[in-house]
Image (tube, rainbow, N blue to C red):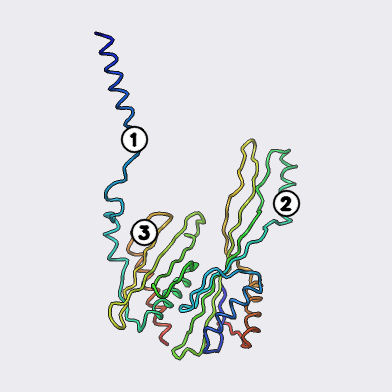
Amino acid sequence: MKQHAFLGLLMIFGALLMQGCAAPEPAQDLLAPTEAQMKIRSIQSRTFDVKDRQRAIRGVIAALQDLGFIIERANEPLGLVTAARFAEPNYYDVLGVTVTVRQVTEGRMIIRANAIYNNKPIEDPKVYQNFFATLERSFFVAKE
Amino acid sequence: MQTRLFETKDERELLSASAAVLQDLGFQVEESAKDVGFLRATKERSAREYGQDIGRFLTFLLSLGNVIIPVDLHQKIAATLIARPINQEATRQEVRIIFYRVVWKGSGQADRQYIPPGQQKMEMLRDPAMYQQFFAKLSKAVFLEAFTL
């Protein structure tokens, strides 16, 4: 009787232990936007009055270069610019940004900047405001 | 990051001349997007430096065989170039180029701890001679004078 109980307990214990060996299932909402991402979606986009998309993309590239970024990828048909830089003064942290330019109507573009710091998205709205201020300045300069 | 201005309407010509100059300098053009005037080129070279090897040997001696500093072994130099018009009538083009490099280091030893090879470091190249050489060649290739800002 005692042996049965002991064996039964051992089997239950073993079954509980084996649960750890099962491969973890990816969560259902792995690809869904996180809370933080949804909050910052609105501050990441801004509309600008630019004559055409090519001019907007060139303005974006100029603004990024002025901020010290290295342009990694620029694709006009897709309206896509990717750039990266070190988060100085510390040379261990990398700041990456992906900017997309989409046309809403003739002469109006939505520019969206996704910035990541190492591997986390930046959630501080001031960072995006600074970027868009620089962008606006670069459009002004191009107009002259 | 050095910028030069060229008095020309032809941006495509400037971009293709830049690609030719980069090839002359030993780079391979990896990516180009002519609609936005973007070029990216790289070249891989050995990064061994005489001074570093000497330093490594001396440190080895002075530390009585305990410390071996990892030296630079291999580097990839990359150049990113943007050409764009900067006035309304597109008669003046601005060419802006950035050189930077990624260096892979070798193996080393520090007091019984083995430092495996493959450490990387990246640095922007800020030696003006490189930029001057590039723009001198570009200027000659398009038969135009390069103005500074």
Residue under label 3, please give it. Answer: A122
Q: Tell me the CA gap for discs 3 and 1.
A: 35 Å
Could you tell me which quadrant the C terminus of chain B lies in?
Answer: bottom right
Q: For residue B1, what is the image quadrant?
A: bottom right
Indicate the position of residue B6 as horizontal and vertical percent values. Answer: 56, 86
Q: Is residue B64 above or below residue B10?
A: above
Q: Is residue A2 left or right of residue A96?
A: left
Q: Are marks 3 and 2 on the same chain?
A: no
Indicate the position of residue B112 as horizontal and vertical percent values. Answer: 64, 35
Q: Is residue A144 above or below residue A21?
A: below
Q: Between disc 3 and disc 1, whose residue precedes? A: 1
Which amino acid type is marked by label 1?
Answer: Ala
Using the image as rendered, state which of residue A81 and residue A136 is in the foreground: A81
Q: Tell me the CA gap for discs 3 and 2.
A: 42 Å
Q: Residue at x 34, y 60 (%)?
A: A124
**Residue B115, numbered circle:** none
Q: For residue A81, what is the image quadrant?
A: bottom left
Identify the subunit bearing mark 3: A
Which amino acid type is marked by label 2?
Answer: Asp
Q: Residue at x 59, y 49 (%)?
A: B118
Using the image as rendered, state which of residue A3 and residue A104 is in the foreground: A3
Identify the subunit bearing mark 1: A
Q: For residue A47, what is the image quadrant?
A: bottom left
